[in-house]
C-alpha cells in the first residue's frame, strides 16, 4: 500500500494526514500523540474512527497540524483520518458517516462588529 493523504478542517485548524501500513504509531508535527495531546479525551476523539473500524494497530499516521486550538485540531484530525480510511476502503464510508465522522463542522467564529463590545453583545442602552 502506498501513502494515502487526506485533509480535515475545523474552525481555523487544518490537519494534513499521511496514512501508511504500520504498527499504529501516530506522529503529530514530529511529536508522539501522547506528547502533543496530553489529554486522554482529545486522544480518544482522534482515535474514534480507527477504533470504530478496529484498525488502530494496522496503520501508521503522520500528521501536519496547523492553526486553531487543541479542540479544533483534534476534531480536524478526526475528520482527516476518517477521510483517509474511506480512501483506503470505500466500504467503510457508510459506517463512518452514520457515526458523523465524515461531516465537516462548518461553524466559524463570527466577526466583531464596530460599535459593539463583541460580535452580538451591545453596549447597555440608556434612555436618559
Image: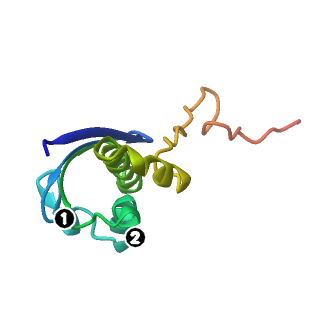
Specify the label residue 6 is tagged with: none
Q: Position of residue 23 (x, y in %)?
A: 14, 65
As drawn, the residue found furthest toward the top would be 114
Specify the label residue 24 is tagged with: 1
29, 93: nearer the viewer:
93
Left or right? Give the position of 45 relative to 21. right
Q: Position of residue 42 (x, y in %)?
A: 37, 65
The structure residue drawn at horizontal position 37% and vertical position 49%, both measured from the top left corner, is: 82
Secondary structure beneath dot 1 equals: loop
Q: Quadrant of residue 116?
A: top right
Q: How many marks?
A: 2
Mark 2 burial class by Cα count in 10 Å: few <14, some 14-19, many 20+: few
- Mark 2 or 1 closer to N-term? 1
Q: Quadrant of the C terminus?
A: top right
Q: Position of residue 95 (x, y in %)?
A: 48, 55
The structure residue drawn at horizontal position 33% and vertical position 47%, both measured from the top left corner, is: 89
The structure residue drawn at horizontal position 31% and vertical position 41%, both measured from the top left corner, is: 87
Specify the label residue 41 is tagged with: 2
24, 74: nearer the viewer:
24
107, 25: nearer the viewer:
25
Q: Position of residue 74 (x, y in %)?
A: 36, 55
Left or right? Give the position of 40 relative to 124. left
Secondary structure beneath dot 2 equals: helix
As drawn, the residue found furthest toward the front would be 91
**Disc 2 from disc 1: Cα separation:** 18 Å
Label 2–label 1 contact, CB within 8 A: no
Q: Can you say whether 50 is above or below 41 in the image?
A: above
Q: Quadrant of residue 46?
A: bottom left
Mark 1 burial class by Cα count in 10 Å: few <14, some 14-19, many 20+: some
Q: How is the image coloured?
A: rainbow
Left or right? Give the position of 87 relative to 120. left
Q: Can you say whether 48 is above or below 73 in the image?
A: below
Amino acid at each position: 500500500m502506498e501513502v494515502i493523504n487526506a485533509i480535515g478542517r475545523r474552525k481555523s485548524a487544518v490537519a494534513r494526514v499521511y496514512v501508511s501500513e504500520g504498527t499504529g504509531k501516530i506522529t503529530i508535527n514530529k511529536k508522539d500523540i501522547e506528547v502533543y495531546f496530553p489529554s486522554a479525551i482529545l486522544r480518544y476523539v482522534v482515535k474514534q474512527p480507527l477504533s470504530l473500524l478496529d484498525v488502530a494497530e494496522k496503520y501508521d499516521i503522520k500528521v501536519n497540524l496547523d492553526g486553531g486550538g487543541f479542540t479544533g485540531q483534534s476534531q480536524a484530525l478526526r475528520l482527516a483520518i476518517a477521510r483517509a480510511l474511506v480512501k483506503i476502503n470505500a466500504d467503510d464510508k457508510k459506517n463512518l458517516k452514520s457515526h458523523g465522522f465524515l461531516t465537516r463542522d462548518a461553524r466559524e467564529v463570527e466577526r466583531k462588529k464596530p460599535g459593539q463590545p463583541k460580535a452580538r453583545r451591545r453596549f447597555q442602552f440608556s434612555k436618559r
